[in-house]
Amino acid sequence: MPNLKLENRAVAFIDILGFKQLVERATEDSESFNFLDDLCNTLKEAVPILNGKVSNSVPEQLIPYHTSISDCLILSAPLTSANNTDYCGLSILVMRVIQLTRIFLKQGYLIRGGISIGKVSHNDSNIVGPAYQTAYLIETQTQVPRIELSKDAEDYWLNRYKESTRTCLYYRGRFMVNGLYDYYYQSENNALDQRVLDPFKEIINEKINTETSESIRFKWWWFKEFLNWEEENNPFIIQNI
């Protein structure tokens, strides 16, 4: 019996930015070591904690698999379900990426990566398949902190969700996950108080002002520009008076 089981799955490859520099500092600085320890714990525990919040009614095989390697997270989920026509594995991964964006942003880290769909075999010990290779390639070619969808994933998303959706959107010519999507912060009238973004602004501004690496500072500047754009273009934001 072959060990590989190739299935149509949605795959996300996510890199935690700034990890390499933190590792280098941690060998000589106790504070950096503690930051690294906390970050590694987050990498290890974030996805299982999120999975644990999934309703018991959801079949286990539909909950995203995850693999953590150094500063990278690999997620995958079945693209479709024969027993649930409303299920969309790509949508599940997009929402999980949004959750992870916020988790790591609160700790002072940006994430970057790619999402693809197609054949892949993913188990507890390994992941193999063209969909994984595509997601990985996107991450290596994306220079800024965004999670970009492959062309196949983009077409699949737009075909399924024909109406406008803010979970995935075009920004500066790329179709990407909106890591600042406000679903979790909307009030009863579906409005978003602008103040929920203020803690993120504080973190971003601090990083821009304190980072010595021009490359890292540029990535935080890019994310600040995206946050400003999201505020200006989100129709549900309540402007503070």
Image (cartoon, grey):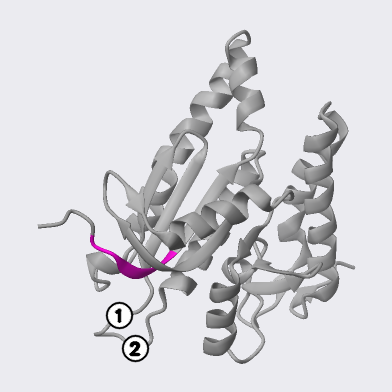
What is the crowding at mark 2: few (fewer than 14 residues within 10 Å), some, or many (at least 20)? few
Q: Position of residue 166 (x, y in %)?
A: 66, 76
Q: Position of residue 53 (x, y in %)?
A: 36, 60
Q: Main secondary structure of the magenta part?
A: strand
Magenta residues, start to end: 5-10
Task: Please state if 239 lies on the left or on the right of 158 as rendered.
Answer: right
Residue 113 visible, this angle: no
Q: What residue sits right under mark 1 in the picture?
A: 81
Q: Position of residue 9 (x, y in %)?
A: 38, 68
Task: Please state if 45 lies on the left or on the right of 16 as rendered.
Answer: left
Q: Please, is residue 164 above or below residue 93 in the view?
A: below
Q: Please, is residue 226 above or below residue 17 in the view?
A: below
Nearest the viewer among 182 and 222 is: 222
Residue furthest to the right in view is: 241
**In what quadrant of the picture does the N terminus appear?**
bottom left
Q: Position of residue 147 (x, y in %)?
A: 62, 58
Amino acid type, residue under disc 1 in the picture: Ser
Residue furthest to the left in view is: 1
Q: What residue sits right under mark 2 in the picture?
A: 85
Q: Quadrant of residue 79?
A: bottom left
What secondary structure is marked by label 2? loop
**In what quadrant of the picture does the C terminus appear?**
bottom right
**Residue drawn at x 74%, y 78% as measured from the top left:** 236
What secondary structure is marked by label 1? loop
Which numbered disc covers residue 98?
none
Task: Please state if 126 lies on the left or on the right of 136 as rendered.
Answer: left
**Residue drawn at x 47%, y 38% as measured from the top left:** 42
Amino acid type, residue under disc 2 in the picture: Thr
Nearest the viewer among 51 and 79 is: 79
**Residue drawn at x 35%, y 51% as measured from the top left:** 127
